[in-house]
Image (cartoon, rainbow, N blue to C red):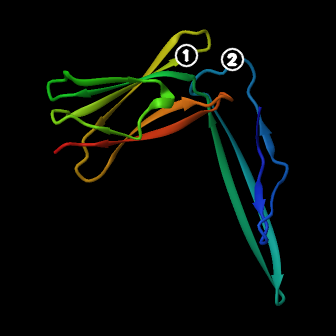
Amino acid sequence: MYYANPVYQTADGRVYVTRGSGISASGEVSEGTELTSALDEETNMTEGGKTKTEKCSVTIRYEAMYRPVRITVCQMDQGHEIVKKDVYRPEEMPEQIMAEKATEYILVEIEKEGLSGENVAAREVYGYEPEGDVWLESFSAREDGIVVKQETRVIWKT
């Protein structure tokens, strides 16, 4: 069960929470299951005889993900051979990685623990971008089980 409770701050800096709406899923929830909830608010203000309406709408997307247990980063050359291979615990992914000179692309494999304890892997390929930075996307689980996204910048040797 997840609750989205709106948080507000008054002009004098006080913060308060109001009741939100809940959303739940029952039974075994497999990876990729999505739940969506929306919060809508409308405020009417009258100034000088004119009524002004402000509307705000927020959509929250929850997605189930198995607990990440290991992240493997393989720097690959033009012939699809491994130039360098590093293995990390999810919470130890560095903020940046230096790509080796021969690296043409990077393969990131995230190993996760499925509902029955089985290993599940997800892979993503990242190529060199001369126009901008490349950020590897990985995930780690907090103590409360919530999985959070983290990004690692790739510094390419040109």
Viewer-nearest residue: 145 or 59? 145
Residue 128 vertical placement versus 65 (above, below) = below
Q: Nearer the viewer, mark 1 or mark 2?
A: 1
Q: Quadrant of residue 96?
A: top left
Which type of secondary structure does the marked residue at label 2 adopt? loop
Q: Position of residue 32 (x, y in %)?
A: 56, 27
Q: Position of residue 102 (x, y in %)?
A: 15, 33
Q: Which of the numbered marks, if any, corresponds to residue 113?
A: 1
Q: Earlier in the sequence, mark 1 or mark 2?
A: 2
Amino acid at dot 2: Glu
Q: Provide residue 44's location: percent of width, then percent of height.
A: 81, 73
Q: Are marks 1 and 2 in contact (CB under 8 Å)?
A: no
**Residue under circle 2?**
28
Residue 123 lies in quadrant? top left
Please give the name of the residue rendered at 80% of the width and 68% of the height, measured from the top-left corner. 43
Circle 1 Cα neighbour tier, 10 Å, few/some/many (<14 / 14–19 / ≥20): some
Instruction: Using a 10 Å C-alpha cutoff, classify the residue at mark 2 as few (fewer than 14 neighbours), some (14 to 19) or many (20 or more).
Output: few
- Residue 22 at x, y = what percent? 79, 39
- Please state which amino acid type lies under the numbered disc 1: Glu
Horizontal arrangement in the rendering, residue 136 relative to residue 39 (left or right): left
Residue at 78 percent across and 48 percent down: it is 5
Report how far apart the C-alphas of labels 1 and 2 lie in the structure.
Answer: 14 Å
Relative to 93, 144 lies left or right:
right
Q: Quadrant of the N terminus?
A: top right
Residue shown at the point (76%, 55%) measured from the top left: 7
Q: Point out which mark residue 64 bears.
A: none
